[in-house]
Image: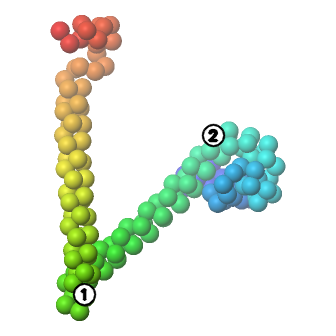
Amino acid sequence: MTANGKFQRGKTVRLREQAIAALLTNPSMRDAARESGVGYSTLIRWSNEPEFAAALKAARNELLDSAIQRLKTAAFNAVGTLIEVAASPASSDMARVSSSKALIELALRVGTIEQLADRIEELERKTTDENNGGFEGSAQTLTETPSERWQ
């Protein structure tokens, strides 16, 4: 398999790529096998091969990345619409209040997420500092029981 998740040359390359595409779009392996023209047992066997599993994972990640990017774009556009409605004198009072409320709720959620991310980062930094201080990975740590370690 190459670095981009594609298979190298071979007679089954096309079938394997078709199988991966079918696995991404079908709810079951049987349906994917039928759509791709690959036998069900062959598809099961391929799925257990590290090269095929890695290519399938890469394809799934690419599909997920694309979906996430589309969601980000849609969210950006939706926030723009909320801002326009909230600021427009032509909007009804109900629409302006509803848009304003949605914007406030979104801002609070973003703030909460940022605070949690900061807290997680601080905990990770503390954990890393403790580990770099010789706590984890030392020979002494490996031979101590948990109760001895904290005395």
- Circles 2 and 1, Cβ within 8 Å, touching? The answer is no
Q: Classify mark 2: helix, strand or loop.
A: helix
Q: Is residue 124 above or below residue 144?
A: below
Q: Position of residue 32 (x, y in %)?
A: 72, 55
Colouring mode (rainbow / by chain / secondary structure / one colour): rainbow
Q: Is residue 78 left or right of residue 19?
A: left
Residue nearer the viewer, 62 or 115: 115
Q: Position of residue 140 (x, y in %)?
A: 27, 9
Q: Classify mark 1: helix, strand or loop.
A: loop
Residue nearer the viewer, 60 or 86: 86
Q: Which image quadrant for residue 142?
A: top left
Q: Is residue 118 above or below residue 123?
A: below
Q: Residues within 10 Å of mark 2 (few under 14, many from 20)?
A: few
Q: Residues within 10 Å of mark 1 (few under 14, many from 20)?
A: few
Mark 2 or 1, closer to the camera:
1
* Residue under the image location 22 percent in, 70 percent down: 101
Q: Earlier in the sequence, mark 2 or mark 1?
A: 2
Amino acid type at circle 2 is Pro
Residue 25 visible somewhere in the drawing: yes
Q: Position of residue 93 (x, y in %)?
A: 21, 84
Residue nearer the viewer, 146 or 102: 102
* Residue under the image location 34 percent in, 75 percent down: 78
Q: Which quarter of the rendered picture does the C terminus lie within?
A: top left
Mark 1 highlights which residue?
A: 92
Measured in 3D between alpha carbons, the distance from the residue under mark 2 to the one under mark 1, in whole angstroms, is 59 Å
Q: Position of residue 72 (x, y in %)?
A: 38, 67
Mark 2 highlights which residue?
A: 50
